[in-house]
Image (cartoon, helix red, strand yellow):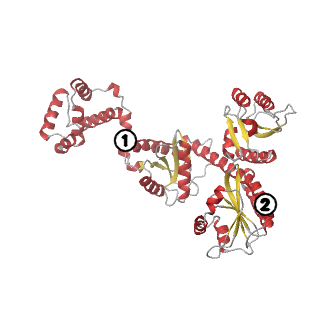
Amino acid sequence: MITAPDLIVAVGPALFEVVVTGKGDGEVRDVFLADPQEPATGQPGDLVLGLGLRDAEDAVELVERCAAGNASGVVVRTTLAHEPTLVAAAERWQLTLVALQPSVTWAHVVWLLRGVIDRAAAPDSPAAGDAGVHQELFALADAAAAIVDAPVTIEDNQSRVLAYSSGQDFTDPTRVSTIVGRRVPAEVIAHFRARGIFRRLARSSEPFLVPDGPNGIRPRLVVPVRAGGEWLGSIWAVVDGPVSEEVTTELSNAASVLALHLLRLRAQADVARRSAIDRLRTILRQFSPDNPVDVRLPPQPWRVVALGSPDGYDVPQQLDLWESTGRRYGWSEPQLADLDGTVLAVVTDNDGPGSWTWLSKLVTDQAKATPGTVAAAGGPARGPADLPSSRAEAVELLGLVRRGLAPGPALRVEEAWHVLTVHRAVTSLDTTKLDGPLATLLRHDIEHSTGFVETLQAWLEYPGQPQRAARQLHLHTNTLRHRMKRIGEIAELDLSDPRERLALQLQIAAVRTEH
């Protein structure tokens, strides 16, 4: 399932802008081209495209008809989308209103959106996956190669190779390494970056020639691929020298078509990511053997890790941050999801990227440069049924690390079992109904401004070590002994009883936690 706002977010801001967010709970199942001369506006679940609208009056009428027909949303050109009367109508009917940039045809919009909707409807189906788009990218690479009569690669804005032409003659080692490794080699990226190539790609939409370089790097004609001002990727053609204006114009036209394919590929990847997060979130919340969820997990045993980021990041930003960090350091398929405001990861207890050993070292290193980066791991999970309990332990432990009650930045429950045990006992106590000697001492401290509870706490924390307890309180040892004698007179205590000592410590911890 995908809603109209989610669909637009998945495609990105290059072509679309959400002007009015509707109810947000209507599923988009198809795209419908509405003609202002026809009364039909599709059916429930349709995202209606306002084709041929002459003015705001036509657009308002379309919005009203779509609202009456329970459409999921309306897409109109940007020239109309911000008209006050149209915005007011969309808000009144609580219908999602989307603005479409003028640089793309309606036919391309239908192709782009239907591909994403199909992916959302069947995220695990090969027919709805990325294979079709990738095949089209390879066809575009061959078409571009035919235009320029040279080998071509198509890359995204992270220098990852998405497709390449079939012709491999008259090339250089850099192209071969790029294709084999599925991304541009690091030393080649450094060379191009030093020459300002990527800065120019990010800012310009005009094709340009890159001269030859060291180690046999031949000249390249580079064509930026943009949509709505956003840099999506580039076409790289290995050429012998300058290329005619006619050829560069044709390649620029091919880049416009390629931009739509890259938008669709990115949108489908985003839908697949959202689907994977939803499935992982389901199994982390509650496992049901009667309704198993297909989740791709690392080798067993697993453990769930609760991740914390520095202040200033909301949950979606934290999720993106941890995913990009994990991939950057070798975790090819991060198993991440957010649940109840916390980012969670499922890791393996084995070695290598995606394991607890690897993640704990990464978090420790990251925390040195970015304080506030923490990770708390729950107990081992031998099967899917154990994941919810591991999650609960991880979230509980993360809270203690953040409050400074357990050491960070990376901690397992096995290393903090005693902290957790005390915390669970303390949080189960109702401090409004305390009884026994501690209640007597608390009343005395309040009525006489004494600090006998603090004194008793230090005495209990350092049993048989009055000198250390006195230093903790900045007192002389004889003063401490005098206070303890006075405490014994006020409240009936038997500090020789280990159970009474434990009970007092738990009650004091509960009171301190409340304050």
Q: Is residue 426 visible?
A: yes
Q: Residue 323: x, y in percent?
A: 56, 51
Choose the circle earlier in sequence order: 1 or 2. 2
Give whichever of 269, 279 is nearer the camera: 269
Mark 2: which amino acid? Answer: Thr
**In which quadrant of the rendered image does the C terminus lie?**
top left
Badge 1 density bin: few <14, some 14–19, many ≥20, Cα 10 Å: few
* Left or right: residue 474 compared with residue 387: left
- Please report the residue visible at 83 percent of the width from the left and 38 percent of the height from the top: 52
**Image mark for residue 264:** none
**In which quadrant of the rendered image does the N terminus lie?**
top right
Relative to 464, does residue 140 appear above or below in the rendering?
A: below
* Left or right: residue 32 compared with residue 296: right
Which residue reaches farthest left? Answer: 478
Give whichever of 481, 463 is nearer the camera: 481
Which of the 4 quarters of the picture holds residue 100? top right
Badge 2 density bin: few <14, some 14–19, many ≥20, Cα 10 Å: few
Q: Residue 351: x, y in percent?
A: 49, 60
Where disc 2 sits, the SS reads helix
- Please report the residue visible at 44 percent of the width from the left and 44 percent of the height from the top: 398
Give whichever of 328, 45 is nearer the camera: 328
**Image mark for residue 249:** 2
Q: Residue 507: x, y in percent?
A: 30, 33
Which of the 4 quarters of the picture holds residue 332? bottom right
Where disc 1 sits, the SS reads helix
Mark 1: which amino acid? Answer: Thr
Q: Residue 402: x, y in percent?
A: 41, 43
Residue under pointer 1: 421
Instruction: State which mark lies toward you, 1 or 2.
Output: 2
